[in-house]
Image: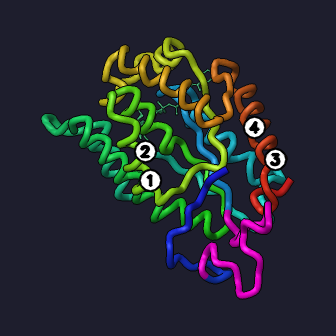
Amino acid sequence: MNRVERPQGLVSQGGSLGDPGEGEPSRQDRPGVFASPLGCFVVLEGIDGCGKTTQLEHLGQWLPTSGLMPAGAHLLTSREPGGTPMGRALRELLLHPPTGASPCSDAELLLYAADRAQHVCQVIRPALEAGDWVLCDRFSGSTAAYQGYGRGLPLERIAALEGFATGGLEPDLTIWLDLPLEESLRRRGGRAADRIEASGHAFLARVAAGFATLARQRGWQRVDASQRSEVVTQECQAALLGYAAQAPEGRADG
Ligand code: T5A
């Protein structure tokens, strides 16, 4: 699976990332062997209210004791938008803008991209480069679903912007919490809708259909999120165990 496209000049413990030492075979000549002690990047995706926050908490407790993470690796849990101090300011602007300050669709896309660029640069990439694991509530898939399928912005333009914002970083594993829209609305109940949630039923239906398409195209692990929370957790754990079982050496123990 494609994950960190190493920016030129970035250096880790072993020297310049991606450059094998003199006389060493290249990474391509050593299948399953990675040039630096990279961690693992796991993302939860799905429509509003599908249970990401709940599962992030459950998996965040389970993962460090699961035996999947290498000894000495830490688990970092985070979310988008809002995984950095700058991101938290952007989150407020995106979800609860002052009167008259709602972004247009293009500006909305750019603000999510800015949040992600900062999150990758300040939090996610340093953690992965240190060999730690990152479990994140939403990433690029949400932009494709909400701004692409939901707002109708061109997917190619979004993909180009994403490449710029993330430097080519992709999750090792994405778990899609699949929940019917009507059930997500029921679960959110009387809670006040944020600006995105208030975009209307047709918008949310396009987003939900977009997630289903993306999951197929991108090979995400689907978990039926309409089940009891404990069962959803067990199925997320199974997805992680399945990933570890087929991951190349160095990505996960177990
Ligand atoms: N966005 C985000 C974009 O448009 N583009 C982007 O690029 C990105 C990154 C972020 C908004 O920004 C948009 C998407 C979003 O609209 P958010 O608040 O971070 O907003 O995201 P939400 O998904 O809206 O977060 P929520 O907290 O509302 O939903 P969760 O985290 O998916 O669900 P959770 O765990 O809070 O559960 C919701 C309710 O259901 C219950 C919980 O107790 C809770 O009451 N629940 C269950 N009930 C029954 N059975 C289960 N299995 C349950 N699991 C949870």
Q: Amino acid at mark 1?
A: Gly
Provide the residue designation for mark 2.
Answer: 159
Mark in front: 3 vs 2: 2
Residue at 83%, 57% (x, y): give it: 253
Within 8 Å of ligand 1, the CB of disc 1? Answer: no
- Say few, some or many: other residues with alpha carbon within 10 Å of mark 2 (under 14 / 14 to 19 / 20 or more): some
Q: Are marks 4 and 1 in contact (CB under 8 Å)?
A: no
Q: In the displayed structure, would residue 3 be above or below residue 195? A: below
Q: In the displayed structure, would residue 228 be above or below residue 132? A: above
Chain-order first, disc 3 or disc 2: 2
Provide the residue designation for mark 4.
Answer: 239
* Residue 246: mark in rendering: 3
Residue at 78%, 66% (x, y): give it: 33
Q: Amino acid at mark 4?
A: Ala
Q: Are marks 1 and 2 in contact (CB under 8 Å)?
A: yes
Magenta stretch bounds: 16-38
Q: In the displayed structure, would residue 44 be above or below residue 178? A: below
Chain-order first, disc 4 or disc 2: 2
Chain-order first, disc 3 or disc 4: 4
- Whole-number angstrom distance, CA of label 1 to CA of label 2: 6 Å
Q: Tell me where residue 186 appears, x and y as whole percent.
A: 49, 13
Provide the residue designation for mark 1.
Answer: 163
- Say few, some or many: other residues with alpha carbon within 10 Å of mark 1 (under 14 / 14 to 19 / 20 or more): some
Residue at 81%, 47% (x, y): give it: 246
Q: Residue furthest bottom?
A: 22
Question: Which one is in front, 2 or 198?
Answer: 2
Residue at 37%, 26% (x, y): give it: 150
